[in-house]
Amino acid sequence: MATHTRRFRPGLWPTLTLVLGLPLLLVLGTWQVQRLEWKTSLIAMLEARHAQPAVALPAVTELGPDLAHRPVRVTAELAPDPVLRYGVERQQGRPGHDVLQLARLADGRALVVNRGWLAEDAPPVRTPAGEVTLEGPVRWIADLERRWPTPANDPQANRWYWYDQDALARAFGAEVLPVVLVASERVLAPGPAVPVPQSMAVNLPNNHLGYAITWYGLAVALIVIYALYGLKRGKDTR
């Protein structure tokens, strides 16, 4: 009479795969959990900073990392030329771009200002004469560096896709501060071409929970496959 017994015989290589792979998967999953906690705290901090009331732009020597996403208010004159076209975005079915201009502060500093979105087929943007009050959150230009697959800037064609402080300084003909102010209100000027301010809500990607689940899921799958394979291989018919 044949008897069926099961023995657990996974073999050398599957066992080595488990011994080496399982700790790695668990470490990667735990790392993503830690990243999730860090990213969640960072987003909460930036959102709280973004909601604070506007303050005067600090002096150059007082510019620090805490300024990122903090609303500021400046009084400055906008240089009418050049007007740089930044990015490509469709709104209500119309292609357009953001408008970058140079703001000259009373203390002589020069600040890059993103006035907002303007349709490609709109008339040339108009610049108000005299001093205007600009308000909005600021971002460190270094934090807005080029990332794949962002196209290269083309100053000759007046097409800008990422903030390059040195290139912007050359385009504007002035040494610019290492921050850009994103206007939260329209800067009114005569004529129909008035850029629409863009939302600067914090939108940092936070996919670490999904990554953690993936790594931990792979760890569980590895254990299950190892167990099933060992049982199947150890099956003995007598």
Image (cartoon, rainbow, N blue to C red):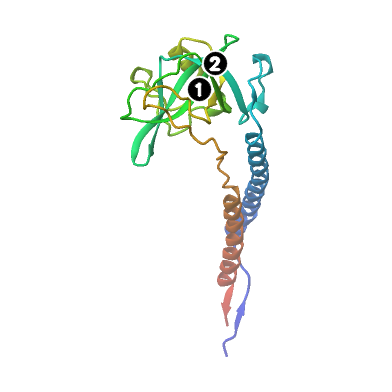
Nearer the observer, 215 or 58: 58
Q: Amino acid at mark 2?
A: Ala
- Quarter holding the C terminus is bottom right
Q: Position of residue 179 (x, y in %)?
A: 57, 22
Left or right of 63 in this view: 178: left
Left or right of 67 in this view: 119: left
Tag 1 and tag 2, C-beta contact below 8 Å = yes
Q: Position of residue 174 (x, y in %)?
A: 50, 10
Q: Amino acid at mark 1?
A: Val
Q: Position of residue 52 (x, y in %)?
A: 66, 33
Instruction: Name the mark on residue 15.
Output: none
Up/down of 207 relative to 101, above or below: below
Q: Which residue is mark 2?
A: 76
Q: Position of residue 214 (x, y in %)?
A: 57, 54
Mark whose residue sits in front, 1 or 2: 2
Left or right of 52 in this view: 193: left
Q: Which residue is mark 1?
A: 113
Q: Secondary structure at mark 1?
A: strand
Q: Residue at horizontal 41%, vertical 21%?
A: 84
Q: Secondary structure at mark 2?
A: strand
Q: Residue at horizontal 57%, vertical 38%?
A: 202
